[in-house]
Image (spheres, helix red, strand yellow):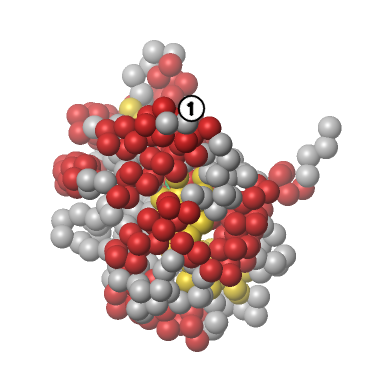
Amino acid sequence: MKISKRSQEIQPSATMKSSAQAKKMIANGIDVINLGIGEPDFETPKNIEQAAIEAIKGGKASFYTPSAGLPELRTAVANRTSQDYGLNNLRAENIAITTGAKMALYSVFQTILDPGDEVLLPEPYWVSYSEQIKLAGGVPVPVVVGDSFKATPADLDKYLTAKTVALVLNSPANPTGVIYDQAELSALNSWTKQHDLMVVTDDIYGQLTYNGATFTSIAQLSEQLDPRIIIINGASKTYSMTGWRMGYVVADAELISKISAFLSHATGNPTAVSQYALEAALSGDQSQVEVMRQAFETRLNTIYPLLTDIPGFRLPIKPKGAFYLFPDVSEALKLSGIKTTGELVSRLLNEAHVSLVDGTAFGVDNHVRISYATDLDSLKTAMARINTFMVQFK
Ligand code: PLP
């Protein structure tokens, strides 16, 4: 048997691994609360499910579609993005529909990177960026940022080399929930323009902002989409459609035609029935999006004070978006004598029956990621369990 060097270097997704472990324990009858997974717990809104059922019944879901998606869906995404972002130059040719935002990102890195090209990744960053960059032959360059968890031009300056080709931004962010404001984005926009860098902006949590916070994308800073900027988006988080695997890339038409060529060999096309579902999601009633957003806001406001009461868990800045908390647990390690965050996460799983993700998977030591995409009662119980676990060391 032979396994390529490239495959040997790839780490499995830490978030998916931790969640699989929790699900296995649950299947064995252990009452584990899984806060490891970034997956909304709501059923997909009924109008979306209905559109998919009708597509199947009408025989529309049986066949291949164009590799970058159905023309009418690409137009719907172009119209919706133009409207939401205030851009006036988007057409179907600027859109590629993909198998989840994960494939959107994968196809972008495959299309823009040459071997050795460096991509700046402000820490902490979502687990798949670094592995996908490596799979494309690129070099992920983690960027250490300040306590705000947001990169500034001064932070990025330290990592800029002649090989740097792109910056990845994710706001609202996984795993920290922080949101860049317009002034911060403006500074990053000028800096990337000055150094002629591409920007991959992963806006998948753009609709999930709380307590009056608003979302701005770096792509919105001009009236026309800048060809240096690539927007990633998808239906998983906004419409609770993780299982449908619908994402998309919004970019310059020439780049999209290359992405489409790549996709024609990689996936053939995104699943037809899911494309009809996404079309219904974008064009239909949006009231469920607000209902889900409000539920997340209530969860955040309930568990943030419970979490910061836990001995050794520090999170001075309350997150404003996405559905994660990323507390510093250095004190918890000191208090408990537990040596690593990996060991802390494993003891919390086995002794407190709460599943979290070790922050090192996101490039940062001494932190854990907690997802609040779970019902309120389970979240309260989970916080009480972690608290009881930590109180024993006081
Ligand atoms: N981008 C970020 C920041 C994410 O957190 C996720 C999922 O967790 C994705 C992209 C991929 O989402 P999907 O492939 O389900 O559309």
Residue 258 in view in this figure: yes
Residue at the limit of the structure toward the front, as seen here: 58
Mark 1 lies on residue: 21
Inspect the image, locate mark 1, and give the three-letter code of the amino acid beneath it. Answer: Gln
**Relative to 126, 161 lies left or right:** right
Q: Quadrant of residue 218?
A: bottom left
Residue 385 in picture, x, y percent from top left: 27, 29
Q: Which is nearer the eye, 198 or 357?
A: 198
Q: Residue at the bottom extreme?
A: 194
| Residue that appears at 34% across and 36% down | 51
- Answer above or below: position of 130 versus 59: below
Query: Which residue appears at 36% of the width and 79% of the height?
Result: 222
Looking at the image, residue 11 sits to the left or right of residue 187; the answer is: right
| Residue name at image x 49 percent, y 34 percent | 61
Name the quarter where the C terminus is drawn: top left
341, 383: nearer the viewer: 383
Residue name at image x 78 percent, y 39 percent: 3
Q: How many marks?
A: 1
Can residue 361 be seen? no
Instruction: Please say if 12 is above or below 32.
Output: below
Q: Secondary structure at mark 1?
A: helix
Residue 171 higher or lower than 336, as above or below: below
Q: Crowdedness of circle 1 by 10 Å Cα count: few (<14), some, many (20+)? A: some
